[in-house]
């Protein structure tokens, strides 16, 4: 129970940090913000990697799902960061 | 070792926070994005060092496939299709969370089934917290996955708005009732023995994702994309609860917060509540008028002009404001706009762009298109700042925008869009409206701006019309 409260506290506090930081992003950058956060949500790759690593607890099906999750998450990570970079360079050049 | 791995996830989360902070100005944004990418690299390296990772070939295979598809999409996608790209990425994020949660469920089955105490000790505790987290992860992940792909279909114009939304509301209610019942049973028994129930619940969640998004009008896609963006983050957080990984929880909630803020901004800009957007059906279905009524509204009152005459008007204009809308994206007219703006500036006119928060199909859509055409971002002016300036504007050029310029929003209490903040272009000395025809916008109502005394319309594709005006300006 204590453990749950701790993780839940972290979750709520992190949302507040997010709101504080993101409220300051100007509307001009809202599209890159979305594609950038798309990339960041690719963080689930962490869980996928462990499922695909062939530990004793994995089975054929769980490994398959893990690899599929890595593929999807990597589309997010690579696609998201690169397209954001492409857009932001457009804003930068004069 | 495990301590270092958890520390690395925390460091990655800090990089993400700094990265998003960089997004607060266009100058620091590129660096911010790079910081986030470094954070991701740290997290991935940490995951690879986890003692559960025994061999790497499946991982490398998955990364190679995902990276190639992602890189290809990022390089090839047209800026006008960014809403589809972001919607698809939301879906992939949700799908990945769904799969990780299911994979973890299967691993728990194997570990607890083996009776190997050492193996069990490495897995999350089999308690109610874990069971609830699995269900939430599956629910949010599946809804995000299917909802996003319905949104992509709508954005591409392959899926229309249904005329009746009653059936979908019914499906949503049935799905939710089944899910509540299923979840209670799942949590109250040994969840590891309920694989069939879990599969059934996944199917229901996928169906729920479709039924939730299909009834939402095409015009409301900016809200839906922002909301699904939020879901994709929350799905990650839920997965964090499943795996007991704080790094995932923090990062997921950052993305969740970002999507929520954008959702709120979009709803405010349309003067609608989130509930009304999600469950109210499309605005055209709520308030739509027939084609005859629409024709009667405009009958004989619209003044049509030509590119040559617009060029003459612009010749003497000191201040010109462009008002871009979704039509500009459809016509790919951003470069043509910039070209005309260049000529005007060369002749000493002041040029600005008025950006309504819901112009286009996603938050910031117009800004990205104009940035692609190398319009300096200082010239892109937000609604509240530009509105007082219209009175000093000689010519306002409306490019494929409709409802966001409709004066009925402030003058007609009976209008369905009454109360929605608009760009007050009617205050400019002359308003040029470039539009293909007189069909109503997403709200399904006629626009009084088009029949104002100071309005002139040029019918045609925004890009072609702008090019004609540009060449006429050159001949002056």
Image (cartoon, rainbow, N blue to C red):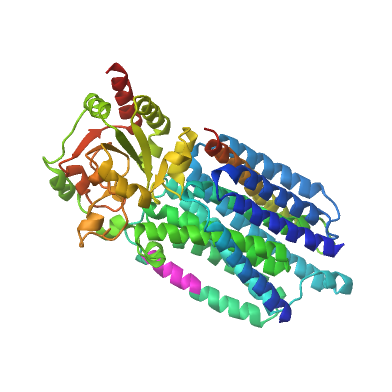
- Image location (x, y in percent) of residue B306: 22, 27
Quarter of the image that includes the N terminus of chain B: bottom right
The residue depicted at 38 percent of the width and 47 percent of the height is B359
Q: Residue furthest top?
A: B475
Q: Image quadrant of residue A79?
A: top right
B357 falls in the magenta region: no
Numbered-mark total: 0
- Image location (x, y in percent) of residue B138: 61, 65
Q: Image quadrant of residue B162?
A: bottom left
- Image location (x, y in percent) of residue B288: 24, 55
The residue depicted at 59 percent of the width and 63 percent of the height is B234
The residue depicted at 69 percent of the width and 60 percent of the height is B100
State whether residue B212 appears in this view. Answer: yes
Secondary structure, magenta segment, majority class: helix
Which portion, as a residue range, is magenta?
A: B167-176
- Image location (x, y in percent) of residue B88: 54, 49
Q: Is residue B67 left or right of residue B319?
A: right
Q: Residue furthest left?
A: B300
Quarter of the image that includes the C terminus of chain B: top left
Who is closer to the viewer here, B254 or B84?
Answer: B254
Who is closer to the viewer here, B334 or B277?
Answer: B334
B172 falls in the magenta region: yes
State whether residue B191 appears in this view. Answer: no
Residue B399's place in the image compared with B388, above or below, is above
Residue B177's place in the image compared with B106, above or below, is below
The residue depicted at 31 percent of the width and 50 percent of the height is B442
Who is closer to the viewer here, A80 or B430?
Answer: B430
Q: Is residue B155 left or right of residue B229?
A: left
């Amino acid at each position: 129970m204590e453990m749950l409260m701790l993780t839940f506290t972290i979750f709520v506090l992190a949302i507040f940090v997010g709101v504080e930081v993101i409220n300051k992003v100007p509307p001009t950058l809202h599209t890159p913000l979305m594609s950038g956060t798309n990339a960041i949500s690719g963080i689930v790759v962490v869980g996928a990697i462990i499922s695909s690593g062939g530990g004793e607890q994995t089975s054929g099906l769980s490994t398959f799902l893990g690899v599929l999750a890595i593929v999807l998450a990597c589309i997010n990570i690579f696609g998201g960061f690169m397209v954001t970079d492409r857009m932001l360079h457009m804003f930068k050049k004069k | 070792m495990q301590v270092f791995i958890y520390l690395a996830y925390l460091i990655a989360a800090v990089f993400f926070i700094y990265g998003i902070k960089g997004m607060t100005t266009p100058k620091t944004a590129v660096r911010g994005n790079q910081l986030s990418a470094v954070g991701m690299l740290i997290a991935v390296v940490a995951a690879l060092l986890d003692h559960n990772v025994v061999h790497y070939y499946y991982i490398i295979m998955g990364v190679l496939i995902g990276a190639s598809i992602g890189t290809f999409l990022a390089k090839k996608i047209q800026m006008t299709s960014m809403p589809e790209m972001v919607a698809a990425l939301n879906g992939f994020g949700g799908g990945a969370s769904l799969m990780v949660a299911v994979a973890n469920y299967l691993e728990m089955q194997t570990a607890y089934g083996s009776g190997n105490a050492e193996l069990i000790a490495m897995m999350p505790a089999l308690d109610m917290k874990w069971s609830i987290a699995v269900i939430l992860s599956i629910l949010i992940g599946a809804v995000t996955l299917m909802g996003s792909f319905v949104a992509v279909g709508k954005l591409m114009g392959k899926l229309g708005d249904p005329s009746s939304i009653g059936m979908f509301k019914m499906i949503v209610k049935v799905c939710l009732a089944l899910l509540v019942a299923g979840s209670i049973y799942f949590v109250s028994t040994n969840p590891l023995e309920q694989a069939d129930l879990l599969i059934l619940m996944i199917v229901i969640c996928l169906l729920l994702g479709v039924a939730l998004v299909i009834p939402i009008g095409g015009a409301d896609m900016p809200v839906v994309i922002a909301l699904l963006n939020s879901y994709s983050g929350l799905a990650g957080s839920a997965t964090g609860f499943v795996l007991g990984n704080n790094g995932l929880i923090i990062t997921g909630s950052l993305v969740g917060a970002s999507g929520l803020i954008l959702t709120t901004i979009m709803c405010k800009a349309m003067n609608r509540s989130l509930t009304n957007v999600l469950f109210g059906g499309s605005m055209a279905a709520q308030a739509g008028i027939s084609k005859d009524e629409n024709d009667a509204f405009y009958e004989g009152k619209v003044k049509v002009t030509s590119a040559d005459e617009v060029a003459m008007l612009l010749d003497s204009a000191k201040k010109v404001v462009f008002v871009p809308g979704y039509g500009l994206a459809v016509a790919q007219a951003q470069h043509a706009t910039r070209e005309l703006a260049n000529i005007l500036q060369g002749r000493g006119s002041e040029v600005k762009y008025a950006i309504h928060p819901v112009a286009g199909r996603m938050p910031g859509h117009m800004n990205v298109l104009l940035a692609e055409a190398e319009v300096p971002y200082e010239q892109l002016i937000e609604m509240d700042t530009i509105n007082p300036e219209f009175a000093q504007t000689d010519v306002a050029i409306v490019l494929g925008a409709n409802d966001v310029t409709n004066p009925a929003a402030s003058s007609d209490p009976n209008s369905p869009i009454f109360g929605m903040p608009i760009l007050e272009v009617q205050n400019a000395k002359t308003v040029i409206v470039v539009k293909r025809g007189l069909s109503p916008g997403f709200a399904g109502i006629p626009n009084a701006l088009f029949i104002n005394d100071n309005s002139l319309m040029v019918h045609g594709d925004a890009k072609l019309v702008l090019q004609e005006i540009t060449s006429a300006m050159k001949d002056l």
